[in-house]
């Protein structure tokens, strides 16, 4: 399972301050910390809506790459910023995300194809779809667009979209996310990668319950073949769940001391 650290987002006060001050040393330290905690990739978000990303995102990419070899995921709704950031990455990044709401999908797909980047396809059209069928239909259409743009499935990550468990029909949504993964892995050939933003499931929950819910949910989705996850690598219980998932999949050698 690919671990994508989602820690560098606009809710992180330390990250926001480092960006505001253009503090390269602080950003390098953050990159080193996330690497040491077990990240395989680092997600980079410099705004919630793409504003100001034209300058902030390329700056963050260059600073993060100074002292880490980890690949990056670029999380932005700003196409101009994505173009500039992709041009300074050391290796093709993962771009998060393309949804049914995107008005410039052809431009994003062209950027992904020409830069040999990877791309998250998100089941989203205005809001997160309620039914399993609606999720799969959106993902099927996005997959067809990506394939038509000569982007192979091995560079695509399908995201069924996860909502928080505590609100409305949250539990039903989460069950459909699980069923979506099963369907994607059984129906699509050649295989497509799958991913979710794990922290979304715990939004609004008391802090003391979040690790348990997140780690249990990650294990639940792993059983449906989840191949990558955006998650908080500072959460020790969550990273223990990652370790055990990898152990059960025979991706690593189990040692009891690793769980201490």
Image: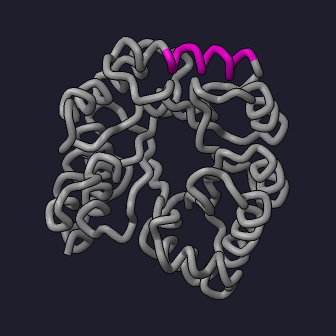
- Say left or right for 154 vs 229: right
Could you tell me which residue is drawn at 72 percent across and 75 percent down?
A: 63
| Magenta highlight: main SS | helix
Residue 91 drawn at (x, y percent): 75, 54
Between residues 194 and 206, which one lies in front from this camera angle?
206
| Count of numbered tags | 0
Q: Nearer the viewer, residue 49 or 224?
A: 49
Colour approach in the figure: one colour
Task: Please report the residue visible at 71 percent of the width from the left and 62 percent of the height from the top.
Answer: 57
Is 154 situated left or right of 180 in this image?
right
Range drawn in magenta: 138-148
Residue 62 in percent (x, y) is at: 76, 70
Q: Residue at point 66% right, 52% down?
A: 50
Instruction: Decide whether residue 143 is among the magenta residues.
Output: yes
Q: Kindly indicate the quadrant of the structure image that contains residue 132.
A: top left
User: The C terminus lies in which quarter of the figure?
Assistant: bottom left
Observer-nearest residue: 190 or 4?
4
Residue 137 vs residue 158, the one in the foreground: 137
72 over 22 or under it: above or below: above
- Residue plotted at (72% across, 76% down): 66
Considering only vertical position in the picture, is 140 above or below 217?
Answer: above
Magenta segment includes 116:
no
How far across and how far down the image is residue 33, in percent? 49, 78
Residue 159: percent from left, percent from top: 46, 33
Residue 51 lies left or right of residue 132; in this view the side is right
């Amino acid at each position: 399972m690919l671990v994508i650290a989602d820690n560098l987002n606009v809710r992180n006060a330390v990250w926001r301050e480092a960006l505001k001050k253009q503090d390269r040393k602080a950003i390098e330290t953050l990159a080193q910390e996330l690497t040491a905690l077990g990240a395989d990739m680092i997600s980079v978000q410099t705004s919630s809506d793409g504003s100001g990303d034209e300058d902030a995102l390329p700056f963050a990419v260059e600073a993060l790459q100074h002292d880490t070899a980890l690949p990056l995921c670029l999380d932005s709704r700003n196409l101009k910023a994505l173009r500039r950031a992709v041009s300074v990455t050391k290796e093709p990044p993962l771009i998060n995300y393309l949804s049914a709401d995107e008005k410039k999908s052809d431009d994003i797909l062209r950027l992904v194809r020409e830069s040999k980047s990877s791309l998250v396809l998100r089941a989203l059209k205005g809001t997160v779809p309620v039914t399993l069928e609606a999720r799969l239909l959106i993902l099927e259409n996005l997959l067809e667009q990506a394939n038509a743009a000569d982007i192979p499935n091995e560079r695509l990550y399908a995201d069924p979209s996860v909502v928080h468990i505590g609100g409305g029909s949250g539990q039903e949504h989460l069950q459909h996310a699980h069923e979506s993964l099963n369907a994607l892995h059984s129906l699509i050939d050649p295989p497509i990668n799958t991913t979710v933003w794990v922290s979304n499931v715990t939004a609004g929950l008391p802090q003391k319950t979040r690790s348990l819910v997140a780690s249990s949910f990650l294990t639940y989705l792993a059983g449906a073949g989840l191949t990558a996850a955006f998650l908080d690598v500072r959460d020790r219980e969550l990273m223990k769940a990652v370790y055990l998932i990898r152990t059960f999949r025979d991706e690593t050698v189990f040692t009891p001391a690793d769980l201490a």
